Amino acid sequence: MSETTSVKQQSTAAFYGQAVASFGVAMGAVTLGIYFLDANAWVRGFLAVGVLYLVTSCFTLAKVIRDRQEAGQIISRVDQARLEKILAQHDPFQKL
């Protein structure tokens, strides 16, 4: 039976910090842009609600993609374990 160890993919602290900082800068820039926009309050409100909806939709999409990928990895591991069990029980010299 072959021993396989799965490598856990984990991002570095620098990558995590960069992603958080980038998100903060982007949200701040859009917020300032909407606040200083030369338009009526309802137009700025509409844009702000639209941006918030877009952000929450992006988080939801990222979570769904991650969950689907993790489920695929689990199924793959189960299939690999079944194959290894079948191969371990197989005796090529056994008479048919």
Image: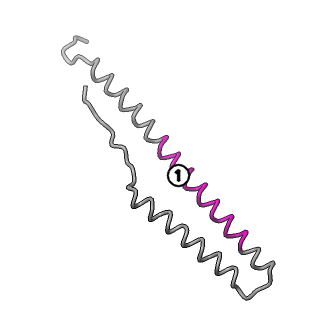
Q: Secondary structure at mark 1?
A: helix
Q: Kindly identify the residue that appears in the image at 54 percent across and 55 percent down.
A: 62
Query: Which secondary structure type mostly characterizes the magenta part of the structure?
Result: helix
Residue 68 image offset from top left, x and y in percent: 52, 46
Quarter residue 87 falls in: top left
Q: Does residue 96 appear left or right of residue 79 in this picture?
A: left
In this view, the residue in front, 58 or 44, is 44
Instruction: Give the total number of marks visible in the rendering.
Output: 1
Q: Does residue 87 appear left or right of residue 77 in this picture?
A: left
Magenta region: which residues? 48-71
Neighbourhood count class around disc 1 (C-alpha, 10 Å): few under 14, some 14–19, many 20 upward: few
Residue 34 image offset from top left, x and y in percent: 68, 79
Q: Kindly identify the residue that appears in the image at 39 percent across and 54 percent down.
A: 11
Residue 56 image offset from top left, x and y in percent: 64, 60
| Residue 58 lies in the magenta stretch | yes
Q: Amino acid at mark 1?
A: Ile
Q: Does residue 27 appear left or right of residue 93 in this picture?
A: right
Q: Is residue 22 above or below residue 88?
A: below
| Residue 4 lies in the magenta stretch | no
On-image quarter of the C terminus? top left
Q: Kindly identify the residue that appears in the image at 36 percent across and 44 percent down.
A: 8
Instruction: Identify the residue at the far left of this view.
Output: 93
> How was the colour assigned to the protein in this rendering?
one colour
Q: Is residue 10 above or below residue 17?
A: above
In this view, the residue in front, 44 or 88, is 44
In this view, the residue in front, 87 or 33, is 33
On-image quarter of the N terminus? top left
Q: Is residue 36 above or below residue 1?
A: below
Q: Which residue is mark 1?
A: 65
